[in-house]
Image: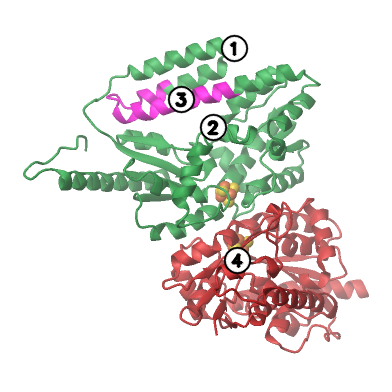
Chain colours: A red, B green
Amino acid sequence: MLRIGIPRGLLYYQYYPLWSTFFQEMGMEVVTSNPTSKAIMAAGSARMVAETCLPVKVYCGHVIELVGKCDYLFIPAIRSIQKNVYNCSKFLGLPDLIKAVVPKCPPIIDVDIDVSKGKVSLHPSSYEIGRWIKPRPKREKEAAKLAWESHLAYIKAMESEMVSPLEYLSGQKPSLASQGNEHFTVALIGHPYNIYDEFITHRIIHRLNTLGARVVLPEMAGRDLLAAGVVKVVGRPYWTYEDEIVGAGGHYLDADVDGVVAIVSFGCGPDSTMIDVVQRYARRPGARPLLTLTIDEHTGEAGMVTRLEAFLDMVARKARRRSA
Amino acid sequence: MRITIPHIGNMYIAFRSMFNGVGVEMVVPPPTSKKTLSLGVKYSPEFVCLPFKLTLGNFIEALDMGAEVLIQAGGPGLCRYGYYARDQEKILKDLGYSFEMVTTELFESKIVGVANLAKRLSNNAPFTRIASAMRFGMAKIAAMDDIERTVHQVRARELQKGTATRLYREAVQAIDDAQDGRTLKSVTKDYTGRLRAVPMNTEIEPLIVGIMGEFFIVLDPFSNMDVEIELGKLGVEVRRSAYVSHWLKFSLFLNAFGISEKDRIHQAAQPYLKRDVGGDGWESIGEPILHRGEYDGMVHLAPFTCMPEIIAQNIMPTIKDRLPVLTITCDEQMGRSGMLTRLEAFVDLLWKKRTSRQMERAPEGRVFSVGLK
Ligand code: SF4
Ligand code: SF4
């Protein structure tokens, strides 16, 4: 059986159900790397120039883990999934970047996904996988349909059942939906590959819970509200993943939450400007308090927890005052 | 309505000529300086790339001089350039300035968009007048680019170091001052002649080093710490593919001159990077491959945290058959002396390579002299 490797990094958190269903339905075995660890991060970092953003280094570490364990790697080059809204350069350069830096890299299936050009969409029916895998798989159409359904089910579970992506993907029991007796609510915003990578952000959702906060996530707001958040703060969307920071920021800073925690990565081009507009938005009177945490390879758990505690103290005080 | 644009090399000359030609006043920000940089750094997000900080500094200085309309790049794209205007507008408004921000998104409709802007700001100047003003602005840029090419050659060979740079500065001023096409032609001819007449060492065959990297940094001498002048002082002839006129022509009239060179660069990059990753990352992979055999080496200018150039830097070491490349990362912490040391070491290395290449080729018992150094 052909083995397809899907590294557990970057867009894994958005599209794993979609892609894994597709390949499984086509009769292939899907191999994933283990959750991020110190070794994975170090292996990735060692192969890239220092300035590279942490998420890409981590992704590279996951690919290294898959070397020798799969026949193909699935690394699409995603330029746009919406008209005239583009991805960060690195998503587009990813297949070539990985091929260059990972020794003994398995062949990469680098389908081009560029909705702006009108040709190929996120829907797997358009991947033309047969170009890579011969003899041409027969069930492509059917597999694509099932894959798309599982993608929609994933989105729906996050939107209406308060399941966190992490729980969904790892098959854990949903916990966020049943939170209830906490006194205040915190929205956690950022790219999924940061907030749901339990290693690089030190299990932040769990932390917030143990510190007494109910947590809500960008996916739970639903795409319409996130899009409205972007429009409110900057107007027409510019980057594909602007929703996760600007959209979620715009939405939650005005929503019924007690505070917002934003995660951005050091050296991330888009984040550097997106978080700036969010911070400016948060300075408007009446906006919810905002804490920005910038993470890199050296972000220690202790330092992060201290900052979270101080912020939550403040949020809790405000929440008490509001309810009093 | 007084209009301004941030500095990218000498681009302001074209815009000033164009806007003045239709009766719109343009505020030219003071030349980018340490002060511009520190203003930009103070009010910019910490980790944003250098061009953002410098152009924000230019805007602050221009607003203080009374600018009311700011032009900035915009429109969909892969890197941050198109996002600048959104964030800078907010930063400047938060600082209490009032102005209108116009983005080059209107360049999407190419020349028509710019003409419409000129029409609006000039209270309806006739299109014929706008067209001739634009043509004149472009002619100035083309003239400056031509002079620059000559300067690159003279700098490497002049006996009295600094002569070409001085003449170049005078020429830019004269071109900026030129009021009509005739004057422009005659000053261009005059300065080209004077440059060619500079006493030069004709014996040497200087090293040839290409300059590539992020467009803004490549064209902005402040950001690149005058890398071209410094290389010239070391007796190196500089070549580069990016000129302001290419950019303007590319943005204003699609498929104009300069595109075929780009195509060749992209083709060379193909085996290592298949796609345009925004900014100039693709070119930074292609140029050291394409110019093999033609240049001795390349200097690669990359702003700190620049996404396209990071991709290029990661891929570059794996390219087998390419020119030696020296990458210089540009940010507000850069120091001139550090850069000079690295340039000198690089130039030494290139001389060694050239010598050993010539020795290899030389018939037995004969050693070629390599001039200078
Ligand atoms: S968006 Fe930021 S973190 Fe993500 S790949 Fe691009 S630079 Fe890296
Ligand atoms: S190309 Fe690089 S330096 Fe230029 S705007 Fe884009 S990210 Fe910034």
The residue tagged 2 is B257
The amino acid sitting under disc 4 is: Pro
C-alpha span from label 3 to label 1: 18 Å
C-alpha span from label 2 to label 3: 14 Å
Query: With A201 as the anchor, is B93 left or right in this view?
Result: right
Q: Residue drawn at (81%, 66%), measured in percent from left and top?
A: A223
As helix, strand or loop, the secondary structure at mark 2 comes to loop
Q: Earlier in the sequence, mark 3 or mark 1?
A: 3
Query: Could you tell me if residue A73 is visible in this image?
Result: yes
C-alpha span from label 4 to label 2: 33 Å
Q: Main secondary structure of the magenta part?
A: helix
Asked if the residue at tag 3 contacts the one at tag 2, i.e. Cβ–Cβ closer than 8 Å, the answer is no
Chain letter for mark 1, please.
Answer: B
The amino acid sitting under disc 2 is: Phe
C-alpha span from label 3 to label 4: 43 Å
Q: Earlier in the sequence, mark 1 or mark 2?
A: 1
